Amino acid sequence: MLAETTNDPQAIAQIREAVRALCAKFPGAYWRGLDRERAYPTEFVRALTEAGFLAALIPEEYGGSGLTMRAAAAILEEIHASGCNGGACHAQMYTMGTVLRHGSAAQKARYLPGIAKGTLRLQAFGVTEPTSGTDTLGLRTQAVRDGDHYVVNGQKIWTSRAEHSDLMLLLARTTPREQAARRTAGLSVFLLDMRAVRDNGLEIQPIRTMMNHATTEVFFDNMRIPADSLIGQEGEGFRYILSGMNAERILISAECIGDAKWFIDRAAGYAKERVVFGRPIGQNQGVQFPIARAYAQMRAAELMVSEAAALYESGRDCGAEANMAKLLAADASWAAADMCVQTHGGFGFAEDFDIERKFRESRLYQVAPISTNLILSYLAEHVLGLPRSY
Ligand SMILES: Cc1cc2nc3c(=O)[nH]c(=O)nc-3n(C[C@H](O)[C@H](O)[C@H](O)COP(=O)(O)OP(=O)(O)OC[C@H]3O[C@@H](n4cnc5c(N)ncnc54)[C@H](O)[C@@H]3O)c2cc1C
């Protein structure tokens, strides 16, 4: 188990070292094998769970490590900088935040200790739907109260890790859009125990994607769930989900920074060793400048991730910074990925070098968990005061 820490640089350095040591046991060959089969990294997730890393943000009173957002970000960054991928389990770290902030005392006591131990997996987050996409307020999944239960009908898409999770945080409409008191009212959050309803109102179908991501489509057909699955107040779910999204954006930004560091390290290493025309390719400015540019871009993004995490820890509004961190870090990792393929020439495409795999993995962050355009729209409207565009 990890010891509680502040943002003391020495404590963070120790965490980074411990994560690196763990990741060293899961080399490229491990990830390549899983990638070919589109298989879940069970052993890696187990090792992270047993080391307490996935319980970083759960307070100690519930059995977690009570670490800071910057410490949690350091864990995910190191996983990615080591060539591993936290996508299979990163949501176990932050999805519980909605329960922690908005759940009842009984819900927290019932779920958080198990989530902290890893005996209970809460790493599925059901928001996106096929017909509404980014327009979350347009979602159609409905939960209708029926005595001591809600009856849920509808469909989600891109519900990642649903097959590897016991619980799902589900966003559904409880008041028809036209009857809601406010534009953002009428959606509710449920902590859905999938074990109780699997194949009894709940169906999960995997979606094969360009990278190994364990994502799924989820169907609800008259799914009956106990009324006490509701988190917080009925109709306030959109607000609860938004507050959790800042944590998600910061932590995924940290993963992008880790990816960028991995690509830069690989490219610089290769450029020093690969000899063509009788000298290392890295002696040519045409090869070294893109690496240097990717480094500068990564460092700038890293500063924004750190600022967003610090603001989050202080309890102040970090919406703009969390969004900018995600935008800049995703751009930095994608630019570094492209540069790394180019630096490696043909070998950038060879499976054994892991670069093509990481390249495919890092493309996702231009689209999910929020797409670049939507971040730009947010900044235009909420920071620059431009007219709302959608
Ligand atoms: C591998 C993967 C895992 C995911 N995991 C999850 C998960 O666990 N849970 C979950 O709920 N969701 C998940 N998502 C969904 C993800 O959050 C969405 O794909 C993303 O938010 C974009 O939504 P969309 O795919 O519906 O695109 P759309 O909303 O259809 O948009 C398509 C394109 O149009 C652009 N666009 C749309 N509207 C505008 C506008 N007004 N102005 C400018 N551009 C616009 C978008 O930026 C995007 O590039 C995942 C997605 C993927 C691919």
Image: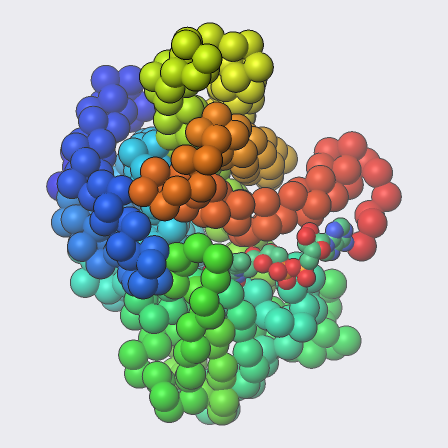
Q: Nearer the viewer, residue 19 or 37?
A: 37
Q: Is residue 248 above or below residue 293?
A: below
User: What is the x, y in percent for residue 85?
Assistant: 34, 45
User: What is the x, y in percent for residue 276?
Assistant: 43, 17
Residue sitting at x 38%, y 50%: 87
* The quadrant where residue 255 appears: top left
Q: Left or right of 210: which side holds 91?
A: left
Q: Is residue 198 above or below residue 84?
A: below
Q: Nearer the viewer, residue 236 or 345?
A: 345
Residue sitting at x 45%, y 47%: 361
Q: How many marks?
A: 0
Viewport quadrant of the C terminus: bottom right
Residue sitting at x 24%, y 64%: 120
Residue sitting at x 82%, y 48%: 388
Q: Left or right of 34: which side holds 290?
A: right
Q: Is residue 277 above or below residue 128?
A: above
| Residue 279 visible at all | yes
Q: Quadrant of ligand 1?
A: bottom right
* The quadrant where residue 15 appears: top left
Viewport quadrant of the N terminus: top left
